[in-house]
Amino acid sequence: MPTSHRLRFVLSGLVCAGFISGCTMTSGDPTPTISDVPVRYGKVKPATGEIVVIPPKKPGAPERTAKQPAPSNLIGQSVAEIEQTFGRPLRIRDEKPALVYLYGSGGCTLSIVFFMDIERNQFRALSYDVRAAGGKTESPEACLGAIQNAKAKS
């Protein structure tokens, strides 16, 4: 056998021996230690070595704050969702095939046009019109907030 082949053989044997020496034999004792037990929602007490399970926090109910609704969020809402936000309308116009809800408060008017959603079998908001009356320069968000606040006071 040439010298280069012997050298390769010896080196490959050493490499294999190095890999094998990294493996350890178990003593046959299957008892897990504290470090073998995975802890998902807990912490190990250092003094006793016991695992204290701390359950994950459950998400709480979202806080119900009177946020001013954004005009773009009105589209697609059901009649019940609109009434939950703004209360009962001042007037309802039945303009087949649409329903028009009219709200007003604090110099602002809001009209929401609902059309039947065939798939859900309920009326959904398709368009709206928010206006400040009497030449006022209130933003649509401020007008919607005024109408929502009027519902909260009643």
Image: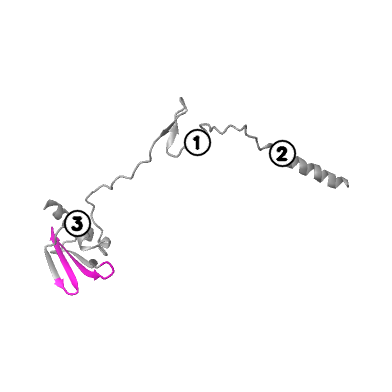
Residues marked 2 and 1 touching at CB (< 8 Å): no
Residue 9 picture quarter = top right
Secondary element at tag 1: loop
Q: Residues within 10 Å of mark 2 (few under 14, many from 20)?
A: few
Q: Residue at x 20, y 58 (%)?
A: 144
Q: Position of residue 150 (x, y in %)?
A: 14, 55
Coloration of the structure image: one colour
Between marks 3 and 2, how big is the CA–CA gap?
72 Å
**Which one is in front in this view, the residue at disc 2 or the one at disc 1?**
1
Residue 107 on the magenta span: yes
Question: Considering depth in this image, is 133 or 83 the residue closer to the camera?
Answer: 83
Image location (x, y in percent) of residue 57: 35, 41
- Residue 12 in the image: above or below residue 52: below
Q: Nearer the viewer, residue 2 or 129?
A: 2
Give the residue type at disc 1.
Answer: Val
**Mark 3 Cα within 10 Å, few/some/many (few <14, many 20+)?**
few
The image position of residue 105, as x and y in percent, is 13, 59
Residue tagged by mark 1? 37
Is the magenta region chiefly helix, strand or loop? Answer: strand
Identify whether 64 is placed above or below 78.
Answer: above
Q: Which residue is mark 3?
A: 84
Q: What residue did someone put label 2 on?
A: 18
Q: CA distance from mark 1 to mark 3?
A: 50 Å
Identified by mark 2, the residue type is Gly
The region drawn magenta spans 94-120
Direction from residue 59 to residue 142 in the image, left or right: left
Please name the amino acid that badge 3 sits on: Gln
